[in-house]
Amino acid sequence: MVALRRIAVIIGYEWRRALAKRKILALIILTVIFQTLVMVLISQLAGSTPFFVDAGPFMWILGVLGGQSLFVPLIAIIVAGSSMSEEYEHGTADILLSKPITRVEYMFGKFLGGFSLLATIEALTTFVGVVLSLWFFGAQSSLQFAPLMFLAIVYFSLIFFCLSFMFSEVFRGSTLAMLAAFGTLIASSIISPILAVLHTTSGQYLYLYLSRGIPTWAATSFPSLLMSELITTPSTVLSAADHEALYQAAIIIAAYAIIFIAVAAYRLLKSDVTKKTA
């Protein structure tokens, strides 16, 4: 119980530290604005596009996913990218670790604090997406799966949160950690589609497997793949269910998250000093 109390204190501290950053608040606002603009645009096209007659009751899926694949990784990178490194830069890591708290408790508190904040932001954007779909398109179908969609979004965000968290501990510099994570995100977003095109043109399944091994594929595909398994929607909303792809995405996310956290834990536990220059 004492250990849990110490972890809870670190979690609260991490929330305060992260929310003090204006860029995080700015990204939250931009996400909501982007969701709203997408729904407004779609609603304006609804009258002239026949497929909306069938797709309208499922617009909550697009409302929830709209902006998530773009902004959630960015928020995750910013929250996690400074989580560990900022303490080294400000010299507060020495103070925190000199208290009656173990390094494992410290890391758990930092990780859970940042990730719970990210999950709360994702809950907000999921709620906004559902509300916007009801506002612009009326009654929606299969809304009982909205909480599951939220959990799927939380799960896929593990990849880039854990990646940025690892860089934050390994490099012990916020700017370098976030740049490395942003670079990985951009490179993954470019390489994965190229590999998919090579698979389509050449028929070589090696390219398909390589494209699915890229972090962005699993992260961006998992929620929609899961929804395709649960509900039947017009093809313009979700593609047909793909059991193999869903399982692959779930496994890839878990594998990346475990590896990234293991590296961060090893770096923290094996480090003799807490200085940034260690």
Image: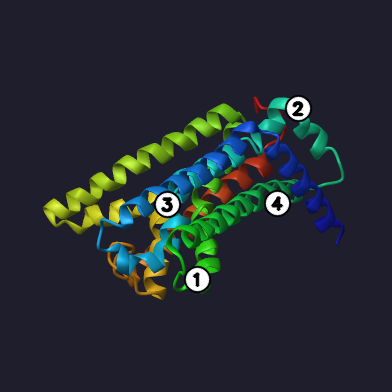
Q: What element carries label 3?
A: helix
Q: In this view, does 249 lie to the left or right of 83?
A: left
- Estimate the spatial distance between the alpha carbons at disc 1 and disc 2, rounded to whole Å: 48 Å
Quadrant including the N terminus:
bottom right
Instruction: Give the answer, above or below, for where 189 lies relative to 221.
Output: above
Instruction: Give the answer, above or below, for where 204 lies relative to 225.
Output: above
Looking at the image, which residue sits at the far front?
Answer: 47
Q: Is mark 1 on a helix, strand or loop?
A: helix
- Estimate the spatial distance between the alpha carbons at disc 2 and disc 4, rounded to whole Å: 19 Å
Q: Nearer the observer, disc 4 or disc 1? A: 1
Instruction: Give the answer, above or below, for where 194 lies relative to 20.
Output: below
Image marks 4 and 1: residues in contact by CB distance under 8 Å: no
Mark closer to the chain start, 4 or 3: 3
Q: Nearer the observer, disc 4 or disc 3? A: 3
- Estimate the spatial distance between the alpha carbons at disc 4 and disc 1, rounded to whole Å: 34 Å
> What is the three-letter code of the residue carrying label 4?
Phe
> What is the three-letter code of the residue carrying label 3?
Met
Q: Position of residue 94 (x, y in %)?
A: 79, 32
Query: Is the residue marked by circle 1 packed among few (<14), some (14-19), or many (20+) residues within 10 Å?
Result: some
Location of residue 100 by image quarter: top right
Q: Nearer the observer, disc 1 or disc 2? A: 1
For label 3, the residue is 39
Q: Is residue 275 left or right of residue 26?
A: right
- Estimate the spatial distance between the alpha carbons at disc 3 and disc 2, rounded to whole Å: 45 Å
Mark closer to the chain start, 3 or 1: 3
- Estimate the spatial distance between the alpha carbons at disc 4 and disc 3, rounded to whole Å: 38 Å
Q: What element carries label 2?
A: loop
As drawn, the label of residue 143 is 1
Q: Where is residue 18 in the image (x, y as percent from the top left)?
A: 68, 39
Mark closer to the chain start, 1 or 2: 2
> What is the three-letter code of the residue carrying label 2?
Gly
